[in-house]
Amino acid sequence: MHDGTETGRREYSPLEQLRSHVRDVSAPALAEPAKILLDALLEKYPGAAALFYGSGASVSSLENPADIVFDFYLIGESYKSLYTSRALQMANRLLPPNVFYLETPSPYGTLRAKYAVLSLRHFERLVSKQTFHSYFWARFAQPIRIYDPAGRMQARLETALAQAITSFCRASAGLASAPFTARELWLAGLGASYKAELRAEDTTRAARLIDNYGDWAVQVTPPALAAAGLSPQEENLKSSLSRQPPRWRTKFAWRLRALAGAALSVLRLLKGAKTFNGGIDYIAWKIHRHSGVDVEITEWERRHPMLGAPGAAWRYYRRRKAIRR
């Protein structure tokens, strides 16, 4: 992190500090399995850049990469540069993102990736405060690797990820009672973002993620709150805000996100069933992996994923409710 307090060095803005942290995360070399998948993806989408996150980004040397579904976002300069299909271009604009599945052979066995596609300008808007729902900015506030072989989008992607962190901390600040630690703010924000989607994350998921991220939350929270105009005042590793957002307004906003998120999740499920081969089974696997809720998919639903997805979603809601009783 840059320190602007030393004599002869300029003061770095909060956004520049966040960009520095984003850059540091992207600096280490990619693991070979991830590089193999990225090469295969960028062959399909020449000129694109990639954002790498999720399970695959934290694979340890003890894990078999063939057992992991790697997560990527491919960012192109425009939708016309990404697709020849006007239908896919329109689908990506109306209900982002389009999600696809890739398998590729490797010395490690068959490697698998789930990847989403966005244009650079659309991505910048989706992670900014202009976007009400947390689907994008809560994801990209977490440590993300940028892979831009051509280097044309690197600077704008760094800035967009810094904006995502700022959007997340701004929206989460009113959930934690001041003074709060960075960990408390992130626990509250991630927990709220899970409830705002059809995501079957248990109550310990956010804590495990924050622990895996090391000092990420501690590093990025103060400059993100400053960039959001909330002027954090740190003392004993806790923060108070000069302008505390009303808690009732923050909680109401997150309730609205949860209501909107339920509908958006089902719509994305329906759309993904058309673009993501095996998508309905993948979503059921993902739900079971994070929550233990087993949503069996029928053969009819596999043959007719657009028609079967609402029934699968309804069974998930019922079984999750029964488990919580």
Image (cartoon, rainbow, N blue to C red):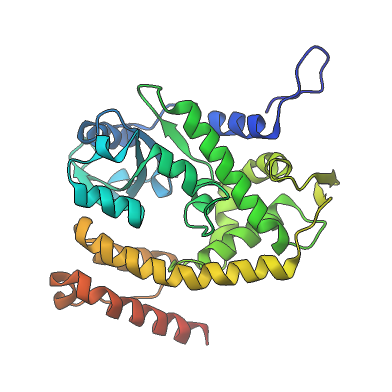
**Which residue is rendered at x = 31% and y = 51% of the image?**
92
Q: Is residue 103 left or right of residue 96?
A: left
Question: Eyeballing the image, is 12 above or below 85?
Answer: above
Closest to the observer, 211 or 199: 199
Quadrant occupied by the N terminus: top right
Image quadrant where residue 8 sits = top right
Closest to the observer, 217 or 243: 243
Q: Is residue 141 left or right of residue 290?
A: right
Question: Eyeballing the image, is 136 above or below 36?
Answer: below
Extreme residue toward the top, this view: 8
Q: Is residue 170 left or right of residue 144?
A: right
Question: Eyeballing the image, is 63 above or below 193?
Answer: above
**Which residue is rendered at x = 76% and y = 64% of the image?**
246
Percent of width and height locating residue 30: 40, 30
Percent of width and height locating residue 79: 29, 40
Is residue 25 among the parts visible in the rendering? no
For the image shown, how many numbered marks are present on the structure?
Answer: 0
Percent of width and height locating residue 48: 32, 32
Percent of width and height locating residue 209: 55, 53
Is residue 296 among the parts visible in the rendering? yes
Question: Eyeballing the image, is 87 above or below 308?
Answer: above
**Which residue is rendered at x = 30% and y = 34% of the image?**
38
Q: Is residue 107 left or right of residue 95?
A: left
